[in-house]
Amino acid sequence: MKVLITGGAGFIGSYLADAFLERGDQVICMDAGSIAKVQHNFGNPNFVFVHDSILNEAMVDSLVAQVDLVYHMAAVVGVEHYVGDPYAVLNVNVNGTQVVLRAAYKHGKKVVFSSTSEVYGRNPKTPWAEDDDRVLGSTRIDRWCYSTSKAVGEHFCFAYHKLGLPVVVLRYFNVYGPRLDALDRGRVVTIFLGQALRNEPITVVGDGKQTRCFTYITDAVKATVAAGLVPGAVGEIINVGSAVETTILELAETIVRLSESKSQIVFVPQEKIYGTSYEDVPRRVPDTTKMENLLGVKAETPLEEGLKHTIEYFRQGCSS
Ligand code: UDP
């Protein structure tokens, strides 16, 4: 089988490429960013890298035409971008997704779309089943532009599905592991890890009682591969996440302990880190019934085990 992965040099995309190559499939990886996460596959005859943006419609069209299955993982991700450059988030995520879906529809190729648990916003009723409500704040709060951009992508997926295109929508819950962002950047795990490895204060936003369900990369990738292969996933939205809820304070304490850091934990107001265009999500918990029943995958890697691998990776200076 031949698979196209847009955003294939990103965090989840690069592991997905590895997984399909291990199965013996051919992978075309399209990405406009750094090649660091896929460089180890250069030289593999089953791996092709195309350094280009999904906004290049002619290129996307020609690549989609060559493959059996499309994973659309390319997106502008990370809270720093939501509040720092909402234009890029909306432009790439909304317009880029249309480019990919248009080509897939033209050539009749199945698409697995990487969406996000951000789509649920701050719905207070947890755990979230896939058809639960989206509860978001004002459009004056830039934080919600990512959630909205991915929800528009999902609507486009289902609009094309009505026209006959096979689509699967995956909503990821705080996936982490080696190759996640770079130290100090992106998401909370790499931010805390950068601080811990330098023995600097760990900046817990608010009171640290907000929760996330941290999902180890290999579990998320198992579910992602299955989503492209299992016929019953077509036309579905599926949460991809661990069911274990962890507070951000617990995460900070665990990272300090596992990395044997001398860091102190400090509590900082959210405005200090993200300015006024940010609003936190108090609890984020998936209902994982569909993932388990439809994809046959349970995200079982314990947080401590996943963090140990992640700490080891970043300790060795692999910060790309
Ligand atoms: N967070 C924190 N300190 C930081 C960065 C993030 O306490 O230096 C918190 C953030 O407020 C949120 C959680 O960690 O409650 C997860 O943030 P992240 O940016 O990883 O993504 P999110 O899960 O909110 O999409």
Image (cartoon, helix red, strand yellow):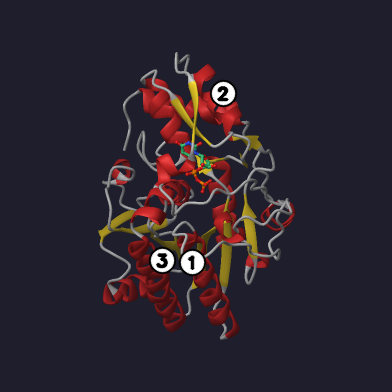
In the rendered view, tell whether residue 210 sits above or below residue 93. Answer: above
Horizontal side of 152 relative to 95 (left or right) equals right
| Amino acid at circle 2 | Thr
Q: Quadrant of residue 167?
A: bottom right
Residue 62 image position (x, y, % from top left): 31, 74
Secondary element type, mark 3: helix
Closest to the camera, between mark 3 and mark 1, is: 1
Mark on residue 149? none
Which label's residue is closer to the chain start, 3 or 1?
Answer: 3
Residue position for label 2: 254
Residue 174 image position (x, y, % from top left): 54, 45
| Amino acid at circle 1 | Thr
Horizontal side of 93 relative to 153 (left or right) equals left
Quarter placement of the C terminus: top left
Mark on residue 93? 3
Secondary element type, mark 2: helix
Query: Which residue: 52% across, 51% down?
Result: 279
Around disc 3, counting alpha carbons within 10 Å, would you say few (fewer than 14), some (14 to 19), or many (20 or more)? many
Frontmost residue, 245 versus 176: 245
